[in-house]
Image: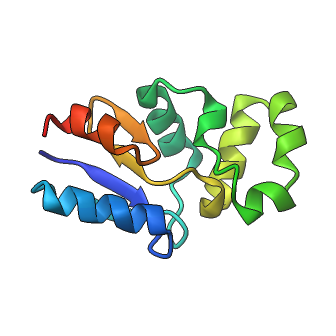
């Protein structure tokens, strides 16, 4: 299976997800969200294939989210402005993102991943 995992190496949840994937025989291509944030077009594509509301792509517990005032701003931002903000700061992006081709999983929830990967 071709898959890409967008992650942040210092994120404990991302490390847990990588360990889980490895233990289930999956070796996705790894992309560091912070070192090389995806551009707005890539994020739009990931968001649309996730089926989640755009706000779910934001890391609401992160420093960048708080410092940028996104709690108050996000509700009035256009999709384009929100995607531009995500592309400008990889730490704003909820992680990990697992791109399975036909769909994208946002955040690591073991039961969801097991179902999606049929393990």
The answer, for residue 28, to whether it is visible in the render is no
Q: Quadrant of the N terminus?
A: top left
Q: In which quarter of the view is residue 80 placed? A: top right
- Quick check: 39 above or below 75? below
| Percent position of residue 21, x then y | 22, 56
The answer, for residue 114, to whether it is visible in the render is yes
Front-lying residue, 61 or 90: 61
Q: Which residue is pictured at 35% across the width and 47% down the height?
A: 98
What colour scheme has been applied to the protein in the rendered image?
rainbow
Q: Is residue 26 left or right of residue 54?
A: left
- Quick check: 49 above or below 114? above
- Quick check: 51 above or below 107? above
Q: Residue furthest front?
A: 111
Q: Which residue is pictured at 83% across the width and 43% down the height?
A: 71
| Percent position of residue 103, x then y | 33, 31
Q: How many marks?
A: 0
| Percent position of residue 59, x then y | 64, 51
| Percent position of residue 97, x then y | 42, 48
Q: Quadrant of the C terminus?
A: top left
- Quick check: 60 above or below 17? above
Q: Which residue is pictured at 65% across the width and 45% down the height?
A: 58
Q: Which residue is pictured at 59% across the width and 61% down the height?
A: 90
Front-lying residue, 80 or 29: 29
């Amino acid at each position: 299976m071709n898959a890409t995992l967008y992650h942040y190496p210092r994120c404990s949840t991302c490390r847990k997800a990588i360990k889980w994937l490895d233990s289930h025989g999956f070796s996705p291509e790894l992309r560091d969200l912070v070192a090389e944030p995806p551009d707005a077009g890539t994020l739009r594509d990931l968001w649309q294939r996730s089926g989640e509301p755009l706000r779910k792509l934001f890391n609401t517990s992160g420093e960048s989210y708080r410092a940028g005032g996104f709690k108050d701003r996000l509700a009035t931002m256009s999709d384009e402005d929100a995607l531009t903000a995500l592309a400008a700061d990889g730490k704003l992006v909820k992680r990990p993102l697992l791109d399975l081709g036909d769909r994208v999983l946002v955040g690591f929830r073991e039961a969801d991943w097991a179902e999606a990967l049929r393990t």
